[in-house]
Image: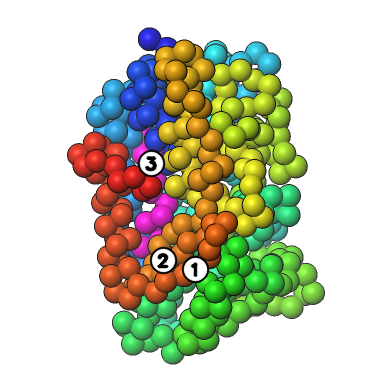
């Protein structure tokens, strides 16, 4: 039986492990934690809609269900020339057939320790919940949410969860009858955050911001974060009792230090079949990979899953286990999400032909909640996977 080592226990790595098993491979999944954190639904932990335990889904259960081996350890180095990886506890490992699904690191900002992120370490979602609860107990305050950019790779921006948590916090404060006691400001260094969704969606977002009395600080680079606010490049200041900030994605340090082929941002260069340039039988998927495509392209979970399914198929083709054509991820590039707002949602779609945001009052929120259950049940094989999801 052909063997494959997959590093990264996130959405991309889990999907790859499942589909490599379907193709008949012996699979070892290497993860630095014992659970997959379902980031798309983590937005509800800080506002107490769901618990941390609902979002942290045991990798042991998925591994047992699909028959792959799980190893919990941390990758500290990769050597493409020797086809080896080095683990924090397990030492040097040979990796003749490797899938890199380790996700991205984060861009560095001065004073970042004074912020919390809904897209950072899973534990930060609990710290955000505690911070919000203390602010509610105080009865008033200034709230600043934002996200950053990576000038070397605009596809590494992840602003959607910031908007979602912002809307959900607004909804919670409204339900408590204390929304008027809080100043809520969204900030970003680009002049039109969310522009990649398309002009119609951007216009609708602007209307929602005005209707809900959200302030904005757009178009100024972030100089540093302080304990009680954000300082911008022109030394103007945004005061804040709670700063939630999502740094743009950056390459993982051990990826940057490797001999892998990298783009200007340090992400791994791949072809349309997710094959790493010049390294036979090595693949990269998800946020670790450098995407090629239209200017509006974005790294999202559903694209990572498509890449994961494709590499399992392409590996089987490359090894002569099946005689079909290899599959490209590029024809599937789009922006697709249900942007939750606590009391509804907006369906966002952007591709080469259209860009839209469709309001889904009430039902949209429950559709996204349902997706969280669908993810867990489908990964366990209890229900079939819906094509395109």
Q: Relative to residue 193, is residue 348 drawn left or right?
A: left
Q: Nearer the viewer, mark 2 or mark 1?
A: 1
Residue 231 to residue 140: above or below = above
Earlier-in-chain disc, 3 versus 1: 3
What number is the disc on residue 356? 1
Which percent across, then down, holds residue 141? 49, 81
Residue 139 counted in the magenta span = no
Residue 195: horizontal and vertical position, in percent? 61, 67
Mark 3–mark 2 distance (CA, rounded to whole Å): 25 Å
Label 2–label 1 contact, CB within 8 A: yes
Crowd around label 1: few <14 · some 14–19 · many ≥20 (10 Å):
some
The answer to whether the residue labelled 3 contacts the one labelled 2, judged by CB atoms less than 8 Å apart, is: no
Q: Is residue 132 visible?
A: no
At numbered mark 2, what does the secondary structure look like: helix, strand or loop? strand
Question: What residue is at 49 percent from the left and 68 percent from the top?
Answer: 356
Q: Nearer the viewer, residue 47 or 103?
A: 103
Q: Which residue is mark 3?
A: 36
Question: Which residues, given as a range, are shown in magenta?
Answer: 31-44
């Amino acid at each position: 039986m052909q063997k494959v080592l997959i590093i990264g226990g996130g959405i991309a790595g889990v999907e790859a492990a499942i589909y490599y098993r379907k193709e008949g491979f012996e699979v070892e999944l290497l993860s630095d934690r014992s659970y997959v954190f379902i980031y798309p639904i983590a937005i509800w932990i800080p506002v107490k809609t769901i618990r941390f335990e609902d979002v942290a889904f045991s990798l042991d259960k998925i591994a047992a269900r699909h028959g792959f081996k799980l190893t919990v350890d941390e990758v500290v180095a990769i050597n493409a020339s020797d086809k080896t990886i080095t683990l924090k506890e397990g030492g040097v490992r040979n990796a003749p057939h490797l899938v890199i699904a380790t996700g991205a690191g984060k861009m560095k900002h001065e004073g970042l320790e004074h912020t919390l992120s809904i897209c950072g370490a899973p534990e930060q979602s609990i710290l955000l919940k505690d911070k919000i609860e203390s602010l509610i107990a105080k009865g008033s305050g200034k709230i600043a949410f934002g996200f950053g950019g990576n000038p070397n790779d605009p596809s590494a921006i992840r602003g959607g969860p910031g908007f979602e948590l912002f809307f959900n916090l607004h909804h919670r404060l409204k339900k408590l009858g204390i929304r008027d006691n809080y100043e809520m400001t969204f900030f970003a260094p680009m002049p039109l955050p969310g522009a990649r969704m398309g002009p119609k969606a951007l216009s609708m977002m602007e209307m929602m911001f005005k209707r809900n009395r959200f302030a904005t600080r757009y178009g100024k680079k972030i100089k540093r974060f302080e304990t009680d606010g954000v300082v911008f490049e022109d030394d103007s200041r945004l005061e804040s009792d709670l700063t939630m900030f999502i740094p743009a994605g950056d390459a993982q340090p051990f990826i940057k230090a490797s001999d892998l082929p990298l783009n200007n941002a340090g992400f791994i260069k791949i072809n349309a079949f997710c094959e790493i340039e010049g390294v036979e039988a090595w693949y990269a998927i998800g946020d670790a990979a450098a995407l090629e495509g239209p200017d509006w392209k974005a790294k999202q979970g559903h694209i990572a899953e498509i890449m994961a399914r494709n590499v399992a198929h392409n590996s089987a083709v490359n090894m002569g286990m099946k005689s079909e054509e290899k599959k490209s991820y590029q024809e599937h590039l789009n922006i697709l999400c249900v942007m939750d707002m606590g009391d509804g949602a907006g369906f966002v779609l952007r591709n080469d032909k259209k860009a839209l945001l469709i309001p889904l009052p009430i039902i949209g929120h429950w559709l996204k909640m349902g997706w969280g259950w669908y993810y867990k049940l489908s990964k366990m094989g209890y229900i079939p996977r819906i094509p395109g999801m």
